[in-house]
Structures are given as structure tokens and as C-alpha cells.
Image (cartoon, helix red, strand yellow):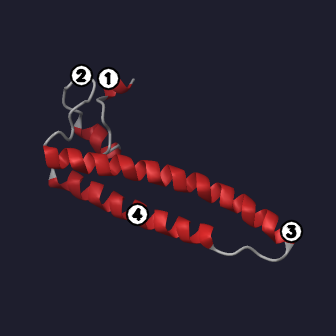
Amino acid sequence: MSEDLKQQLQLLEEELSHRLERISGDLKSDHSADFAEQVTERENDEVLLGLQQETAAALVQIKQALRQVDEGAYGICESCGEEIGAERLKVMPFATRCIRCAE
């Protein structure tokens, strides 16, 4: 496995962790006393909750990929056991299946 891919995974992990912290902070902020403003703020909270869930799920995938790196199993398809192509891993560094099995 190339050191570049491991670095890319670590950078993604860091970026997602920071994003999750910012979203959590935004969700903890107080709402306005104005009812009309509260409606807008609560709608924004729904969007933030969706982003929070997506970010947390992506972070889990990145952490799993980093564990696979440490275990020497990174880049191996979990379905067929064949090597996942380098181009696929560049585009989707947390891929767990080769393109054939993913289709």
C-alpha cells in the first residue's frame, strides 16, 4: 500500500473529526427568543443532524480502513479476496470491495 493513500486516509479522518466537532457545536447553540427565527433555526438543525450522521458514518469507514492498513488487509476485497484496484482506492480510499463485487 502506498504511503500516500495512508496519508490521505489520515487527512480525511482529521477533516471529518473537525467537521463533526463543528456540527456538534452548532447544534448546541441556543435558539432565538423570536418564534419565527426558531422555526428557521430548527429547520437548520434538521439539516445539521443529517450532516452529522453522514459525517459520523464516513468517519467510521475511514477508521475501519486505517485499521485494515495496520492489519495488512487494506485494499483487499471483503467479498472475493482479490486486490482492490489502485484507481478505485484513490477515488474511494475506504472502499471495502473491488469494482466487480461492488457492482
**Residue with the mark numbered 1:** 100
* Secondary structure type for disc 3: helix
> How far apart are the alpha carbons under marks 2 and 3?
55 Å
Q: CA distance from mark 4 to mark 1?
A: 31 Å
Q: Position of residue 65 (x, y in %)?
A: 27, 46
Residue under circle 3? Answer: 36
Q: Which residue is mark 4?
A: 17
Q: Earlier in the sequence, mark 1 or mark 2?
A: 2
The residue tagged with tag 2: helix, strand or loop? loop
Residue 26 sits above or below residue 7 on the image: below
Sequence-wise first label, 4 or 1: 4
Disc 4 residue type (three-letter): Ser
Chain-order first, disc 1 or disc 3: 3
Q: Quadrant of residue 74?
A: top left
Q: Residue at x 53, y 51 (%)?
A: 53
Q: Say left or right for 46 vs 40.
A: left
The residue under label 2 is which amino acid type?
Answer: Cys
Q: Residues within 10 Å of mark 4 (few under 14, many from 20)?
A: some
Image quadrant holding the C terminus, namely top left
